[in-house]
Structures are given as C-alpha cells and as structure tokens.
Image (cartoon, grey):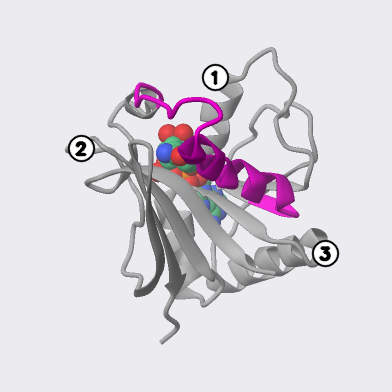
Amino acid sequence: MRTVYNTATSLDGFIADQDNSLEWLFSVEEPEPGSADATALGETEDFIARAGAIVMGATTYEWIVEHESGKPWPYQVPTWVLTHRELPRVGGNLVFAAADSDQELRDLHAEMVGAADGRDVWVVGGGRLAADLARLGLLDEVVVSIAPVSLGGGAPLLDGRVRLRALEAKLLGAFACLRYEVVRD
Ligand SMILES: NC(=O)c1ccc[n+]([C@@H]2O[C@H](COP(=O)([O-])OP(=O)(O)OC[C@H]3O[C@@H](n4cnc5c(N)ncnc54)[C@H](OP(=O)(O)O)[C@@H]3O)[C@@H](O)[C@H]2O)c1
C-alpha cells in the first residue's frame, strides 16, 4: 500500500497552464492503439483502477466537474477533495475537508489509508498538496508522464522542496515516464 502522486506534467514542471487549461496535454499525439507504447501507457489507467482512495485539491476537482459535466463522477472509490469552500457535490463517494495544520493533514491521510483498505492512495494534484504530503513523510512515490512541451508558467508539479530517488525511466510514445520514491529525511 503506497501513497502515490501520479500525474502528467510539462517538461518545465507545470500540471496546468496559467489558465488552468490542459489543452497542451490533450494535444499530444497518442500512440497507435494496440501498440506496445499504448499498452504501456495503459499502466496509468491500471494504477488508477487499482487505487483504493483518491485525494485532490479544489482546483483539480473544479476542473473535473467543469470538463466532465453531464457525465457520472469518474471514480468509484472514496475521494477526498481538500477545500475551504462549499463546492457542488456531483455524485460519487466524495468527502470535502480542509486541513489547515500538519496534524489535520496527517489525520485525513490516515482516513484515506483506512478507506483504501490495503490498496494505494492516488494523489491527483495539485503540487502544494503533494509537496505537503511529502514534507510530512506521507508520500511514497511520484510518477510523472512528461509531455513534450514547456509552458513557461502555470500550476507547479511540486510546490515545495521534495527529495526523490529515481526508480524507473521509460519512453512511451511522446511521453517520458519517470517513477521516483520520496526520500524521507
Ligand atoms: N496534468 C495533470 O495530469 C493534472 C493532474 C492534476 C491536476 N491538474 C490541474 O492542475 C491544476 C492544479 O491546481 P492547483 O495548483 O490550484 O492545485 P489544487 O490542489 O487542485 O487546488 C488548490 C486549492 O485546493 C484547496 N486546498 C489545497 N490544499 C488544501 C488543504 N490542505 N486544506 C484545504 N483546502 C486545500 C485550496 O482551495 P480553497 O481553499 O479555495 O477551497 C487551494 O487553493 C488544476 O488546473 C488541475 O486541473 C492537472
């Protein structure tokens, strides 16, 4: 059971552009269906399908709600949305919560681990949440699919200092995919 920040990013370390758009990501050419690269890229979908709990920040949640409107909430497993606001509830197993201290974030993470029941916790984003979890020793891995584009600004991949040890690197279609473990001080 691991807590894993698994995301796509630009080469210069942004997970959304300055307008909170992911157009730069969706415009990357996908590998041929059925090709080895397409199969390997499916590993991300497998990881998501296997996760037992999910956590994301409010902006990420709002992006999903806006862009998937009319469709059912895409995840079945318990999903924590960190926010200070009353956000619209769109179905699924959603838990809205705020963590304004390290202890509150530790407590929420313990709830997620309990709900995941032996499966992984997927940290969707954003970069401050992931860095906060890493700082508290609660993040095990960072897995990034690097799109062949730089953005020059936007939402940072990791908003804080996090020491990592590389475990795996591979080229999948247009994406460079890297897996790191978080080094605990
Ligand atoms: N490239 C990808 O694969 C990928 C993956 C994930 C996300 N994204 C995109 O990247 C962007 C990320 O946005 P972001 O950098 O703003 O990060 P975010 O984590 O999605 O949202 C940040 C907001 O979440 C709330 N929040 C975060 N931590 C909290 C805490 N401990 N307690 C209470 N509330 C907390 C706060 O909102 P309030 O206090 O205002 O409620 C904060 O302003 C989005 O556009 C998203 O769509 C891309």
Labels 1 and 2: the sequence-earlier one = 1
Secondary structure of residue under mark 3: loop
- For the N terminus, the image quarter is bottom right
Circle 3 residues within 10 Å: few <14, some 14–19, many ≥20: few
Q: Nearer the viewer, residue 64 or 170?
A: 170
In front: label 1 or label 2: 2
User: What percent of the width, then of the height, locates residue 169?
Assistant: 37, 60
Q: Residue at x 61, y 54 (%)?
A: 122
Query: Is the CB–ligand 1 distance for label 2 below 8 Å?
Result: no
Q: Amino acid at mark 3?
A: Asp
Query: Is disc 3's CB within 8 Å of ligand 1?
Result: no
Q: Nearer the viewer, mark 1 or mark 3?
A: 3
In magenta stretch: residue 29: yes
Residue at (59%, 38%) from the top-left corner? 85
Where residue 108 sits, quadrant-wise, is: bottom right
Left or right of 181? Residue 56 is right
Residue 67's label in the rendered image is 1
Residue matched to label 2: 150
